Amino acid sequence: MPDRRITKSKYTADRGIPGAFEGETVTRRRFMTGTAHTAGAIAASAFLLPTLGFALGPIFEKREESWQDVGPVADFPDDTYVPKTISIASGIGEVGKSTVYMRKHNTDIDGPQKDEYDGFIALSTRCMHLGCPVSFKSAAQRFICPCHGGVYDFVGRVDGGPPVRPLDRFYTRVRNGQVQVGPRFSVNQELHRFSPRDPGEPLDGVGQYLYPSRPSIRKIPNT
Amino acid sequence: MPKLKLPAPPLPPGFPKPAPKRPGTPKQKPLEVAAEAGISVVDWVDERTSLSGGARWMMFRKVPKGTNWFYTLGSATMFAFLSQAVTGVFLAIYYRPDASGGAYESMRHVNDDVFLGEFVHGMHKWGSSVMVILIFLHMARTFFFGAYKYPRELNWIIGVVLLILTMAMAFTGYLLPFDQRSYWATIVGVNINGTGPLVGPYLSDFLRAGPEFGATTLSRFYAIHMMLIPGIIGALIGAHLYLVAKLGTTAPPWQKLPASAIDAEERA
C-alpha cells in the first residue's frame, strides 16, 4: 500500500490558509465542526443519561431490612414444616406475596444453633433451578418443584433434578413471643450462608464469583 | 394535465395493448375525472418531493429468473409485523399495566365484553407465533439459497438482530395478560437471563426493576414491548428493505446461467 499520509505542516499559517494566526494548528472549519458535534453530544446526553439512570436505578437501590410476624413460637413443630405467607414486594397485592416453609430448629437435623437468627428454619419456596414454586410433600419428606422436576431433601439440599443449589432461607428471630421472618439469604450445598442470589446461580466452586451478589443487598454481617 | 407518468407494466405476449387516447377525444366520463383528480393530487406532492423516483426505485426492480413463491416469505414476515403493530396499538386502548389486578382484569374485559375484543387479542396472540415461524422460514430460504453471501452479509446481520428483537417482543409480551402462566413463565424467563455469568444477575435486576418481581416490573415490560423494541424493529426493517432494493435478490441456486454468461466467465 502506498503511503497516503498527508505530510502537510500542522500550522495553518504554513499551509497558506487565509487569515491564519501565528502558531494556529486548528482550522476554523475543524473548530466549528468540533463545536457543533460537542454541542449535539451534550444536548443528546442531557436526555439520554438521566433516562438511562432512571431505567437502571432500581438495580442499585438499597432495600430496608424488614421483619414480619408470622405467628407465636408454639405454632412451629421441629419435625415438619408449616407454610406461612409473607410479603416480598409491596404495593402489588397478591402478586407480592410468597410462601415460606417454617419449623423450629432441630439439633438432631440441623446441628447446633449458629446464632439468634437460626432458632427457626424458614425455607423459601422458590425453586433454585428457574424460580418456580416448590411444595413440601410430607409423604416423601421432600420438596418437589412442578416445573422441571427439581427435588430437595428435608433441609432443602438438592436431592435430584436440575436445581443448582439448596433452597434459599430467611433469617428468623423471636420478638415478644412472635416469630419474625427477615431478609432472604442463599446457601451452598454445605448450608453456609451467602448474600442472596437469584435462582439458577450456583454457589459451590467458582459459582459465587461468577454470579456476584448485588452490592446493595447483602446478608446480615457476621452471620 | 398530469405530468406524472408511471412506467407501463410489462404485458404477456398476445395481450392487447391499451390504446392511447386519440387527441381531441370529447367529454370525459365521471370516472375519468375522478382518476384525473387523484393523479393531480399525487402529482402535486411528487412535484414538491420527487417521491415517485424513490417509489419507482423501490417497486419496479428487475428480479432474477427463477424467482418463486419462497421469495415472498420476507414480505409475509413484514405483514405479520404490521398486523402485530396494528392489533397491538388497538389492544393498548383497553390495556392497563397494573400488577395489582388491573392488568388481568383489563384483558378479561377485552376478551369477554369488548366487541371483537377476543378476536383482536387472538390475532395478536397467535400472530406472534406466526411471525416467529415466518421469520425462521424466511431465514431458511435465505440460508439454503445462499442469499446471505457477498454482498448481502450486512442484510443477514440485520436480519439476525431483527430475529433477536422479535424474540424479545415475544418474551415481554407474554407477561402482559398477567395470568398465572404469564407470571410464572416470566419468572422462569428472567431467571434464565440471570444464569449468564457476571452480567446475568444485573440483567435480571434490570428486567425486574429490582431484586424481586415488583410493582414496576409489568409497566417496564409493557414499555419495552410497545415502545422501545417496535421502534427499533421498524427502523431495522427500513434498513433491511433498503438493502434488498439496493442489492437486488439472488437467483435460486438451481437456476442455470445463460450460455453467453458462462462463456464470458470462462474467458475471464
Image: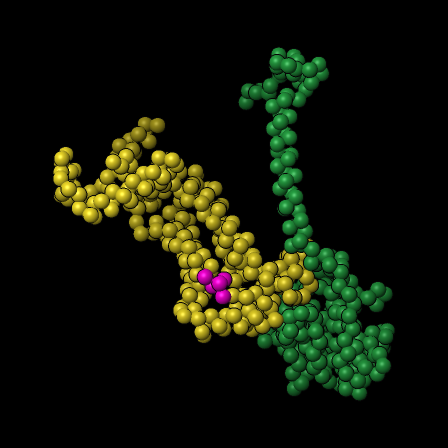
Chain colours: A green, B yellow
Question: Which one is nearer the viewer's eye here, A168 or A28?
Answer: A28
Give coordinates of residue A13: x percent, y percent.
Answer: 66, 13
Main SS of residues in magenta: helix
Residues shaded magenta: B90-94
In the picture provided, is B32 more to the left or to the right than A76?
left
Question: Which one is nearer the viewer's eye here, B58 or B246?
Answer: B58
Q: Quadrant of the N terminus of chain B?
A: top left
Q: How many marks?
A: 0
Q: Quadrant of residue B172?
A: bottom right
**Does B177 lie within the magenta span?**
no
Q: Quadrant of the C terminus of chain B?
A: top left
Give coordinates of residue B151: x percent, y percent.
Answer: 43, 38
Give coordinates of residue A34: x percent, y percent.
Answer: 63, 29
Give coordinates of residue B114: x percent, y percent.
Answer: 44, 71
Question: Which one is nearer the viewer's eye here, B8 or B11?
Answer: B8
Residue at image coords 52%, 62%: B173
Residue at image coords 50%, 60%: B170
Question: Which one is nearer the viewer's eye here, A56 or B22?
Answer: B22
- Decide if residue A105 is in sight here: no
Residue at image coords 42%, 41%: B242
Residue at image coords 15%, 38%: B21
Measured along the vertical axis of the image, is residue A46 above or below residue A213? above
Measured along the vertical axis of the image, is residue B105 above or below residue A211? below
Q: Quadrant of residue A9?
A: top right
Measured along the vertical axis of the image, is residue B206 above or below residue B267? below
- Decide if residue B99 is in sight here: yes
In the picture provided, is A140 more to the left or to the right than A188?
left
